[in-house]
Amino acid sequence: MTNLTLALDAMGGDHGPHITVPASLQALRLSSFLRIILVGNQAEITPYLSHAEHSVRSRIEILHTTEVVSMSDRPVYALRNRKQSSMRLAIELVRDGKADACLSAGNTGALMAISKVLLKTLPGIDRPALVSCLPAVNETPVYLLDLGANVSCCSETLFQFAVMGSVLCEVVDKNPSPKVALLNVGIEEIKGNDQVQQAGQLLQQSPQLNYVGFIEGNDLFSGNVDVIVCDGFVGNITLKTSEGIARLLVDQLEKGLKQGFFVRLMAKFLTPRINSVLNQMNPDHYNGASLIGLRGIVVKSHGSADESAYLQAINLAVTEAQRRLPQMIEERLESILLDINS
């Protein structure tokens, strides 16, 4: 397999090197073709590498910097004033062709702003969007975007998100006609704000897209559609509410399995199936969202991710790089936009 290099913002997120470095070591042990550039404070990173075996340590490079984008930094401030931050330097490595993908658990707004300026967007795309795959009852992937990169969106931006989501589903899942829906307060055509209404009209006029109309929040995980589109304000709340409910259900199920001799006995025989259900419900299993619409690959991890969840985000970044996702989206996107504008 071709060697691949990942630039990792080692200081980003709630835990910094305490989580990012051990997860990186685990990823390197699992993938012999992988190299990782850890961008951050060398003095904070190095202690976590002390016990790494040579075959792993030899595939790690440290790019030292002491500057960090804080979670409270406004995007414009981070863009103008954090030019030596671990986040920016990691993105620059992708821009300069020294890394195939970038991963950060840091400030989402800053990551979007810096990525957009340094990497630029694909032709026909005004703003990148955060997209992630949700579980569904029929076990088919459901893509939700935007998850928080763009809090406010006009109808044209929502339309572009729908195009990108559809193309993503086509190229990744080999789905020739993904069903695309707009997340709304009702399925009736008269429901929703002006932006959603106008975006729906634009999508109805796009023959290359399989637009099926509006979808409500209670249908998110039904698997009835392949791509669900909304602005980042709605998407972020939707995602985190879903994750909160999933954690509650996992917690209650685990507590229930410990109560009573008969339940514990049944659980012993059903453990494989129970573990499968718990894994499907656990939001950490789906950690990592791709910032699509850029000319390079950028993946965002939850800021609160633990080592296991952060490893999932690393795996996503590796997968996106292997797929050459931006190039594939650009090729398909050009055809769709030409047809729409003609």
Image (cartoon, rainbow, N blue to C red):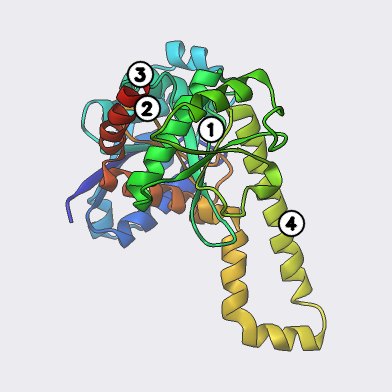
From the viewer's perspective, is residue 44 above or below residue 50?
Answer: above
Mark closer to the observer (4, 3): 3
Q: Earlier in the sequence, mark 2 or mark 3?
A: 2
Q: Residue at x 67, y 30 (%)?
A: 189
| Mark 1 surroundings within 10 Å by alpha-carbon count, few (fewer than 14), some (14 through 19), many (20 or more) | many
**x%, y% of residue 297?**
33, 35
Q: CA distance from mark 1 to mark 3?
A: 24 Å
Mark 4 element type: helix
| Mark 2 surroundings within 10 Å by alpha-carbon count, few (fewer than 14), some (14 through 19), many (20 or more) | some
Quarter holding residue 195:
top right
Pick the front one: 64 or 142: 142
Q: Residue at x 38, y 50 (%)?
A: 175
The residue type indicated by label 4 comes to Leu
Pick the front one: 67 or 324: 324
Are the residues flagged by discs 2 and 3 in contact, CB closer than 8 Å? Answer: no
Q: CA distance from mark 2 to mark 3?
A: 46 Å
Mark closer to the observer (1, 3): 3
Residue to which mark 4 is pinned = 248
**x%, y% of residue 232?**
58, 29
What is the quadrant of the C terminus in the image?
Answer: top left
Q: Residue at x 65, y 18 (%)?
A: 194
From the viewer's perspective, is residue 187 above or below residue 199?
Answer: below
